[in-house]
Amino acid sequence: MKLVNHPILFITPLFILGIVLGFQFLVPLKYTLGLLWLILFLFFTNYYYSKSKLFFSPFHTLLVGFTMLTIGFTIAQLQRVENKKQHYIHQNLKEELLIEGVITDKLKPNRYYFNYLLDVKTLQKKPTEGKVLLSIKKDSTQKGLAIGSSIILKEKLNDVFAPLNPHQFNYQLYLKKQQVFKQVSTEINEVNISENEGFYFKKTAEKFRRQILESLHQSGFTKNQINLTAALLLGQRKELSKDIYHDFTAAGVVHILAVSGLHVGILLIILNVLFTPLKKLKAGKWIAYGLSVICIWAFALIVGCSPSVIRAALMFSFLNAGLIFNRKGSTFNMLCLSALVMLIYDAYLIFSVGFQMSYLAVLGIISFQPLLKNKFYIKNWLGRKSIDLILVSFCAQLGVLPLSIFYFHQFPAMFLIANLLILSWLFILLSLGIIAIIASSLQLEIPLIYEGYAMCLDLLLWIIHKIASMDGLLLENIFFTKKMMLSLYLFILLVFLVIKYYKKTFIYAVLLSMLNFQFFFIYEFYRIYKIDKFYILHQNRKTLLAEKENYQLNIYCNDSLHGYSLNTIDNFKTELAIKQAKQFPIKNIYAITENKKLLVIDSLGIYKLPKNVKVNYILLSNSPKINLEHVIEELNPDQVIADGNNYRSYVQRWRKTCVKKKLPLHYTGEKGAFIIDR
């Protein structure tokens, strides 16, 4: 497969690299556009004179590559909010503002708030653009707002909460990559809500999904069956229970909960059967193609336009357009072309985990599966189909393995068996699901279909739960960095080239890439090994301290670890490659280093120091009733720290005392964990 015959395989990676660079470096638009016009002028000049051989081929190739790099860079700059003059980040946000906007999406609610994405239309009645996180306090009488609702409220735009402890999921950074930079928290009675009477795709899709789920409920399906159907066929996983989602993750089949090419393929088979009679007409091929495209894109809109389903819909549209015009398209070309279209429309998709994993999974399948299939040919039909399923699952997993471990730090060892058990009859399950949805929406009484589909759903849940319950088959807390991920992808790429071309050069390159991965593996573990720190972590109503030395983590806490505190320690184990963690009760004094001492003063307010011991840090915990001014004068510390296990009124009083004594106060509830280098 030569790049000269597939130019899109050459330009797509450079275009993506240009987008990545565009988000790394902020450049004024006038300079970016000036560079783009210069590159385009050189490109078209070279194209015009190429017939007279004024420029050599290597120069032309270099110019094409630089042109695509510049186009990608420019698209990223054009879409960056910093270059949009009407975006709210350029306005004064220090006071309360009159905000008008439209609800564009529902996010997963938490214990106290319903969460939405609000598309801001005006601030202080001035035209404005941008998305904010809208959190509305839960009310016993409130069911939540509908997508498409118009909102008016007067509130202050605040920063999205950043994690207060190291190595936690950074929700603030995640939302920034979704172009959400601020949040608004309010109560329902402070919001003026009106229904948007205009046509709105997402509003119509949500209404249609609600009607489908309601019709399934009326047909006698249980809550778990309805929620699983919503995930499998409608792309809505918000209502899926944590236990069920964990089972799918542990079994290595969580990908079937993401509506993707598999679902689009099944829908295509059904559509092809329905539209077969049309092909007998004079223009039947065109009519069938047009109707199929309409149905596929309608399905994509209904399920919420996830990157995986949009990718599948685009690939189908391009592939079938080629067949209509008698131009057979390469799957690689269709994959690259769909990625180009999606990134031109929304360059921020490059940060979407769903986008990345969807394309890498398909790339793994179309790269490795044809090569491996030829080496594992079996005459027996059942054996051949079983091998095909295993190879598809293995190749998809190979494509996403480094990225999956990097993001989620776990690996399901049973993924091959689970996929073989599930994928073999998933076609029947999804087909029955589509028929059940259509029948229930039309209020047709077909008990055989409903009962058969319900049994299939229960069987799926039972199989997944049994596989997930097998101890030791889910490898968790895997230490894996970005350098290790990239070096592993390089190794996989070179293995592909060896299998396809079997040249000595590639074999040597594979061996070097193995050494490269081992180098980064050893280097990253050594880097982590050298990090020795003492952490005063933030935890509401609990004091939690941690001390890292080499690969060991000592945890100091007087209570058992559960919930948030347990999750905090688990993240430490993962990100710091901890091999051993031990818990101890909290001590009165810690000798962090020879010259750094930490004194803990708890609710008793009693402290006793050995003679000639200089205290550098004082930790106030559990709201001690002390005269802080007297303590400071007696001990003369360098820093006072208050953790999350204190009344806020006490913290405010201590802050005033520290200001008076010109001593810094670090409150973990505002500034996050306090970290001391050892």
Image (cartoon, helix red, strand yellow):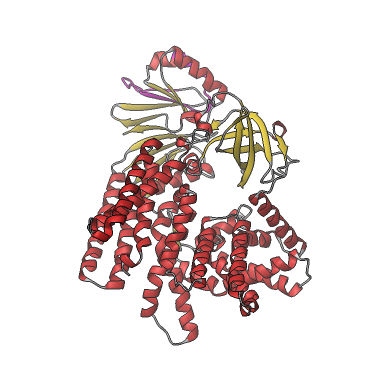
63 is higher (above) or lower (below) than 647: below
- The secondary structure that dominates the magenta segment is loop
Q: Residue drawn at (63%, 78%), measured in percent from left and top?
A: 281
Q: Quadrant of the C terminus?
A: top left
- The percent coordinates of residue 228 (x first, y second) are 63, 61
In this rendered view, identify the residue nearer to me: 173 or 469: 173
In this rendered view, identify the residue nearer to me: 17 or 109: 17
Image side of residue 93 versus residue 534, left or right: right
- The percent coordinates of residue 251 (x first, y second) are 51, 64
Q: Residue drawn at (58%, 71%), measured in percent from left and top?
A: 286
The magenta segment = 607-630
| Residue 515 seen in the current view | no
- The percent coordinates of residue 85 (x first, y second) are 49, 33
Q: Residue drawn at (28%, 42%), measured in percent from left and top?
A: 530
Q: Does the stretch in magenta take in 307?
A: no
Which of the 4 image quarters holds residue 489? bottom left
